Image (spheres, rainbow, N blue to C red):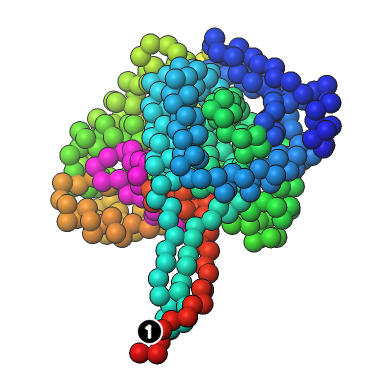
Amino acid sequence: MSEATLEASPGVGRRTTPIHGHEVPTGIHIGGRWIDLDTTFDVTDPATGVAFAAVSDASEAEALQALDAAERAQRAWGSLNPRRRARLLRHAHDLVRERADAFIDVMVVESGKPRAEAAAEFELSMGFFEWSIEQIGHLHGDFGPGSNPGYRVVTSLQPIGPSLLITPWNFPMLMGARKMSAALAAGCTLVVKSAQQTPFTIALLVQALQDAGVPDGVVNLIHTMNSGAASAALLADRRLKKLSFTGSTAVGSHLLTLAAQHITHSSMELGGNAPFIVLDDADVDLAVREAVVCKFRNAGQACVAANRIILHRAVADEFTEKFTAASAALKVGPGFADGVQMGPMISEQQRQRIDRLVQGAVAKGAELLTGGKAVPGEGFFYEPTVLRGVGRSSRLACDELFGPVAVLYTVDSVAEAIDFANDTEYGLSAYLFTRDISRAVRIGEELECGMVGVNRGIMADPVAPFGGTKASGLGREGGDQGVKEFLEAHYIALTIDDERAQW
């Protein structure tokens, strides 16, 4: 579809839908225009199980049109004076903050999470946005002498170019803001593909960037039910220079295969199987409080959630009793209800998958300490569940659970805890509870993962590099590396008349 065709198309417009009192665009966004397509798909509120809105369903053709727009805008955006780029993004940041209620409410409706969690996600997202903007003024190159006389080494950091950002449904604001702000700060133009389950939070973010004056074509957004075809079409196009994906290891592996066609630079934040280790000298009450948050935040639907809770035998009974009681006491319900601490799972399919895992484990002899069944009534709620007596080779121990199920394991030594923690293909995050700082450092260095939380269950921070090792991904988001994932070093060997060479 050419730009002229877009101009004349009867589908071009800006339809919106009301979501909890906020008007949100329902179309895709290409070249500065909202485009409402005839083909749509429904978005479901997981707290009710009922579709509440429809969104435009893009094809491969629209995906490539988004890349057309990104490519046209790349040269001007990439060469824009850094201070001007920072001012534009700062204005966008301020607009997003002014619209906080809309972002938070829309997150609650489309993802199901409690409003307090959505508000915390909004604040963390703004932190990443602000951090990326602050990096713009520090993206300097270098100048210095060569190894031999007669030339100088001149280096600069240049934007990689048009980038495909694929965001997940579990943290729609955080993942969108973290990726988009870093790429835009680096000077890259974007094709953003939203998650099918949560397209509207990203739409609000794109609208804010447009309202702030970010030039047409710099940020393009597609929603699609055929993510595989759209991603394949984009990765088959040499004009795409960067892929940033957050999602499952299986999908990430497939995308890397597609990216290999043109050696497209790729960043991957993939699955996890986080060990949560409580040693014999730990503050058990602290470990219990942090474990409840680490496990049941977002109904356990987080790649960094505690997946295997590994307890030293000396504290296992005390931890188990207190953790089970705290888990059973969690208030489950719709995100807007007062006092709710855990919302629904994202879909009935996900809920059934978790239930099959739990019932299968119980049938094989696992002890069910609390929970273990779907909550009756509307929506996709599942009880906070605690199991023990599960084999270390079971699916519950080896797979990423992505649900409100905590599995407790007991070990007899620190060495056994470390061996079990590292016995996984994943390496995203780990958690360690001990009162001994030397022990914490030694064990933390032995854990095979990208991030270790010591005496804490949440560690995402804009100033820290977020990412994993092994099958958990490539690259980092946040920290000094986040923006640089979208930059390439460019080197000029500058020949000069060097009189000193004669000395």
Q: Is residue 151 above or below residue 16?
A: below
Crowding near the residue tagged with mark 1, few <14, some 14–19, many ≥20 C-alpha atoms within 10 Å: few
Q: Is residue 86 left or right of residue 37?
A: left
Q: Which residues are magenta?
A: 449-473
**Of residues 73 and 189, the one drawn nearer to the viewer in this rendering:** 73
**Of residues 474 and 384, the one drawn nearer to the viewer in this rendering:** 474
What residue is at 45 percent from the left and 74 percent from the top?
152
Residue 412 percent across, percent down from the top left: 24, 53
**Magenta stretch contains residue 115:** no
Residue 60 percent across, percent down from the top left: 77, 40
Q: Quadrant of residue 229?
A: top right
Q: In which quadrant will I find the C terminus?
A: bottom left
Q: Is residue 101 left or right of residue 215?
A: left
Q: Is residue 434 left or right of residue 229?
A: left
**Of residues 333 and 270, the one drawn nearer to the viewer in this rendering:** 270
Q: Is residue 473 above or below residue 222?
A: below
Say how many tags the image has.
Answer: 1
Residue most toward the bottom?
502
Residue 222 percent across, percent down from the top left: 67, 34
What residue is at 48 percent from the left and 45 percent from the top?
82
Q: Is residue 431 left or right of residue 371?
A: left
Residue where numbered disc 1 is placed: 500
**Of residues 449 and 116, the one drawn nearer to the viewer in this rendering:** 116
**Magenta stretch contains residue 463:** yes
Q: Is residue 490 above or below residue 79?
A: below
Mark 1 residue type? Arg
Q: Quadrant of residue 219?
A: top right
